[in-house]
Image (cartoon, rainbow, N blue to C red):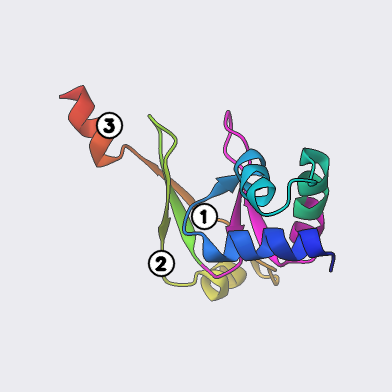
Amino acid sequence: MTKYGQMILDIINQSLDHLTAEQIFFMCKEKNEKIVLATVYNNLSNLCNQGLIRKVSIEGSPDRYDRIQRHDHIICKECGKISDITLQDLTESLQKQLEFQIDSYDLKINYICPECQNEKK
């Protein structure tokens, strides 16, 4: 793994946020001024392909990157805020229903966060 790849992996694994490539770039830039945005994108792609991080895609928003630890996401339909939620692992149940083995799944639950609910009142 390259030094930039390791730096990006460390940033993602140490963050509880769901960072965009641009946010990761600026965090890397604080540590190493020479890094360019293309390097961040290339390393994010490699880390995803290696199964070391996961990409969270939400229609109409930039992709976010997250640690690989098993968890799901709740997403506010109003502001786009992403939060982690830990639910029972559904892999076994899904496999029984589908009658074939699945590698993984990505559950996204849409809701309206308390802050947005308060703004509507």
Which callout, 2 or 1, points at the residue further toward the start of the chain?
2
| Distance Cα–Cα, label 2 vs label 3 | 24 Å
Q: Is residue 66 magenta?
A: yes
In the rendered structure, which amino acid carries the disc numbered 1?
Answer: Leu
Residue 44 percent coordinates (x, y)? 75, 52
Q: Is residue 101 magenta?
A: no
Q: Which span of residues is magenta-colored?
A: 45-70
Check the image and report above or below for 17 versus 10. above
Q: Quadrant of the N terminus?
A: bottom right
Packing grade of label 2 (10 A; few <14, some 14-19, many >=20) is few
From mark 2 to mark 1, how far is it between C-alphas? 10 Å
In the picture, the disc for residue 116 is 3
- The answer to whether 21 is drawn above or below residue 119 in the figure is below
What is the total number of numbered labels drawn onto the structure image?
3
Q: Secondary structure at mark 3?
A: helix
Going 31% across and 37% down the picture, which residue do you hit? 112
Of residue 70 and residue 96, the one placed in the foreground of this image is 70
The answer for how far apart the CA atoms under marks 3 and 1 are is 22 Å
Please state if 99 lies on the left or on the right of 77 as rendered: right
Query: Which residue sits at x=41%, y=66%?
Result: 86
Of marks 3 and 1, the one in the foreground: 3
Residue receiving disc 1:
107
Task: Determine the secondary structure under disc 1.
Answer: loop
User: What residue does disc 2 label?
Assistant: 87
Work out whether residue 76 can be spotted.
Answer: yes
> At label 2, which amino acid type do we have?
Leu
